[in-house]
Image (cartoon, coloured by chain):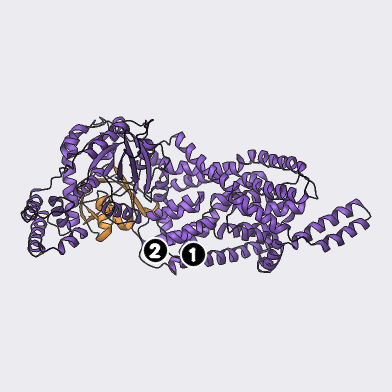
Chain colours: A orange, B purple
């Protein structure tokens, strides 16, 4: 299983599954983070504690714990 | 916008109540401001508007009430502000919805639009930031969009005020026309089930406020309120098996059991279809990096990001002190001159003392800091309006997380550097109640603008001009760090529990308009001055009265006799000074101060400082005005030139000064903030905790600061 934070900076990939539940899952979905969406990894904060991603035209900051819940296809540049 | 110059007879005017809805940071408040010339607070981060605000204005022959609702990504109750919006839309009376969307990111914004379309409400779509979209090469066919959705879609720009009349005309047209159901089309499987349920409801002549089609949609989405209503209806017995069957059918088609996720995918698919039809985007031949990406490469750099942020903050406090101190001297000199001028015209001694030593000295001491306050507010306004705030939250989340705080706590905390009151309110962007309470407890540690005068005063009194800016920066950083450690302690004791997820939108960088910054800063400065003229003036007069009465005549007679017997002028002046001092000590305020003095003696505070701390509970500016009054009275036998800064450096030992700053840094912000805190935290008991927590921390740290300073100096 590939998770988002395995991707290097700048990689673009497709979301396969969300391993979140309840309100957090709905929150992610309302931001457009859902199955089939394209996601780009823009930047890591110091020590990878937080990541910046781009979904559609929106930039989002996610903590590593949340980013780890996003399963993605093979990372491809 | 042009307002109706000759308003129609108010009885005749029709009243339209509009709910303004949209995702966060799409410019809803800005749009209200542009339409109605109101001055709602706007900024470039999510969660500027946390409460619904009503704005009234006239246009053509109509009276409008626009309710500006907090931004919401979807119909969920994730945060308090989203709950405010959801509750309003579901439970309150209004005629029409204006759904504001960001034209540069239509696809994401339509997600909320689709949900709004299931409500059977009259609706107009405002395609905001249309000018920005045009610049980015995004072309939206608005008439075609209107046709596809069966909703008027009007391109507008809140910034350049384009399309506002067209928008309001569309609102009036929709208001006057009967309700038209917008077209929202689902996948075949879902449409089939909607058709079944709708058909059943139609056959049994079921009627409700919303259409049967939307009832079917809501039932399939498992919307609780719709369930509750139908549950009490005899139709339920037949409806229930239909719904179970429908669920199974849809779940098979989507290969998922999460109905919310299924509907989100349905909406997304519908929106993608709409977008391909109406949006034409010019493909850039070479994939050029956008401005935001280029700025972010520097500002959120993993290594340099945090140093750059610290540098910005340091520069801000340097500027606050260096630039702010120039007009400060003029203002100080002006009030000195003004006091003398007024003083010479009043013959009655007590009245003169009230006006000159009380009112002018006290209010003057507060007004003196207007330049500093303005610079600080400009800095905060820039942080808010450029989009940098979210970047700092991103950079600091890892660090904050270690202390049990949330990256988004950064937003209320930074707001706290301006004033604690809006900071308490903006903590609503935090979803988790424990995380929110924790942030509320910590906000007070971020020194607000009203404490700035105290710091500037003491930094100016004890340090050279070149060092004072750094001292100011150090005070603010130390306050923030103490806050972080306090957060850690609270997190480990009172607010144990799971962490709130961190998911935050990072807005595009925008150049703030000068007009906007100017307006924000002027409003805040004016509020500060107004406070100085009313609340603080009143408090100052009270302090003056309490420090002048009761007159001890016996004391005066003994000293007068002594003065007469005195040999030299020097001795006479000294005796006169002693008389003033002991008069002050025997005043009401002196008695209170003397009574409390033993408690604060370990911190090196004399009774005047003790009193200033107590009056400071009302507002931090009063600390300065109290010191102003107390030292003005003690000093007026002396040289008239002595300003408050010199009086302080002369009368207060260095270690006591440091301890005083530490105490002011930590204890309760002010009366007004305490009221707001109690409301936001949800109970008086939290205020009691806060009072005990801050006072004890202030006392202990102040004691340590005093002892350490004594040791090293």
Q: Residue under circle 1?
A: B687
For the N terminus of chain B, the image quarter is top left
Give the percent coordinates (x, y) of residue B634: 76, 54
Q: Quadrant of residue B301?
A: top left
Chain letter of mark 1 equals B
Q: Which residue is nearer to you in this view: B531 or B713?
A: B531
Say which element carries label 2.
Answer: helix
Rounded to the nearest angstrom, the CA distance separating label 1 from label 2 is 15 Å
Image coords of residue B231 (percent x, y): 15, 64
Camera-side residue: B341 or B267?
Answer: B341
Q: Earlier in the sequence, mark 1 or mark 2?
A: 2
Q: Quadrant of the C terminus of chain B?
A: bottom right
Secondary structure at badge 1 equals: helix
**Residue B641 vs residue B101: left or right?**
right
In this orientation, does residue B606 appear?
Answer: no
Contact flag, marks 1 and 2 (Cβ < 8 Å): no
Q: Position of residue B547 (x, y in %)?
A: 71, 58
Q: Is residue B683 shown left or right of residue B19? A: right
């Amino acid at each position: 299983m590939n998770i988002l934070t395995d991707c290097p900076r700048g990689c673009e990939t497709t979301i396969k599954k969300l391993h979140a539940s309840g309100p957090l899952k709905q929150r992610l979905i309302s931001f457009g983070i859902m199955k089939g969406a394209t996601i780009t990894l823009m930047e890591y904060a110091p020590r990878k504690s937080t990541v910046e991603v781009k979904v559609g035209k929106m930039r989002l900051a996610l903590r590593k714990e949340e980013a780890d819940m996003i399963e993605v296809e093979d990372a491809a540049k | 916008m042009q307002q109706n110059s000759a308003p129609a007879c108010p009885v005749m005017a029709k009243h339209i109540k509009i709910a303004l809805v949209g995702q966060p940071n799409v410019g809803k408040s800005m749009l209200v401001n542009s339409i109605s010339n109101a001055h709602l607070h706007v900024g470039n981060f999510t969660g500027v508007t946390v409460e619904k605000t009503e704005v009234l204005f006239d246009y053509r022959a109509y009276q409008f009430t626009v309710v500006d609702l907090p931004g919401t990504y979807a119909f969920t109750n994730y945060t308090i502000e989203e709950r405010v919006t959801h509750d309003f839309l579901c439970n309150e009376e209004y005629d029409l919805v204006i759904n504001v969307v960001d034209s540069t990111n239509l696809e994401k914004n339509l997600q909320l639009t689709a949900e709004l379309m299931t409500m059977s409400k009259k609706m107009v779509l405002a395609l905001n930031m249309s000018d920005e979209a045009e610049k980015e090469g995004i072309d939206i066919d608005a008439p075609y969009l209107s046709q596809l959705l069966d909703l008027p879609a009007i391109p507008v720009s809140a910034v350049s005020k384009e399309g506002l009349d067209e928008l309001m005309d569309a609102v009036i047209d929709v208001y006057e026309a009967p309700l038209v159901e917008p077209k929202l089309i689902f996948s075949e499987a879902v449409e089939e089930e909607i058709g079944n349920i709708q058909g059943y409801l139609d056959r049994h002549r079921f009627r409700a406020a919303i259409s049967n089609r939307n009832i079917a949609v809501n039932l399939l989405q498992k919307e609780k309120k719709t369930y509750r209503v139908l549950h009490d209806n005899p139709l339920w017995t037949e409806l229930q098996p239909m719904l179970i069957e429908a669920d199974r059918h849809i779940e098979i088609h989507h290969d998922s059991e999460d109905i919310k996720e299924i509907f989100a995918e349905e909406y997304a698919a519908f929106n993608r279809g709409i977008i391909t039809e109406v949006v034409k985007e010019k493909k850039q031949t070479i994939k050029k990096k956008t401005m935001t990406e280029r700025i972010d490469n520097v500002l959120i750099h993993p290594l340099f990001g945090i140093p750059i942020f610290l540098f910005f903050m340091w520069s801000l406090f340097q500027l606050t002190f260096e630039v702010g101190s120039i007009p400060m001297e003029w203002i100080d000199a002006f009030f000195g001159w003004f006091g003398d001028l007024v003083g010479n015209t009043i013959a009655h001694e007590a009245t003169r003392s009230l006006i000159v030593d009380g009112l002018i000295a006290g209010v003057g001491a507060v007004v003196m800091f207007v330049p500093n306050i303005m610079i600080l507010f400009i800095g905060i306004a820039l942080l808010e309006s450029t989009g940098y705030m979210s970047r700092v939250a991103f950079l600091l989340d890892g660090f904050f997380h270690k202390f049990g705080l949330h990256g988004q706590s950064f937003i209320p905390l930074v707001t706290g550097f301006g004033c604690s009151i809006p900071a308490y309110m903006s903590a609503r962007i935090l979803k988790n109640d424990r995380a929110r309470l924790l942030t509320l407890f910590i906000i007070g540690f971020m020194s607000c603008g009203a404490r700035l005068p105290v710091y500037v005063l003491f930094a100016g009194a004890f340090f050279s001009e070149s060092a004072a800016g750094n001292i100011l920066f150090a005070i603010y950083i130390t306050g923030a760090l103490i806050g972080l450690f306090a957060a850690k302690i609270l997190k480990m004791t009172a607010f144990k529990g799971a962490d709130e997820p961190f998911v935050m939108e990072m807005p595009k960088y925008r150049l703030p308009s000068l007009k906007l910054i100017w307006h924000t800063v002027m409003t805040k400065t004016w509020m500060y001055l107004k406070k100085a003229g009313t609340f603080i003036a009143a408090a100052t007069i009270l302090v003056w009265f309490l420090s002048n009465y009761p007159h001890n005549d016996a004391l005066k007679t003994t000293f007068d006799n002594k003065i007469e017997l005195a040999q030299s002028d020097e001795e006479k002046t000294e005796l006169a000074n002693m008389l003033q001092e002991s008069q002050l000590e025997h005043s009401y305020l002196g008695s209170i101060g003397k009574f409390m003095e033993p408690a604060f003696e370990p911190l090196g505070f004399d009774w005047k400082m003790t009193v200033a701390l107590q009056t400071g509970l009302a507002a931090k500016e009063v600390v300065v005005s109290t010191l102003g009054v107390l030292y003005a009275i003690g000093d007026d036998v002396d040289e008239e030139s002595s300003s408050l800064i010199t009086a302080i450096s002369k009368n207060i030992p260095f270690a006591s000064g440091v301890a005083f700053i530490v105490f002011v840094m930590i204890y309760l912000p002010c009366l007004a903030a305490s009221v707001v805190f109690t409301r936001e935290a949800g109970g008086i008991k939290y205020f009691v905790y806060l009072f005990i927590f801050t006072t004890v921390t202030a006392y202990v740290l102040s004691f340590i600061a005093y002892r350490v300073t004594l040791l090293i100096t």
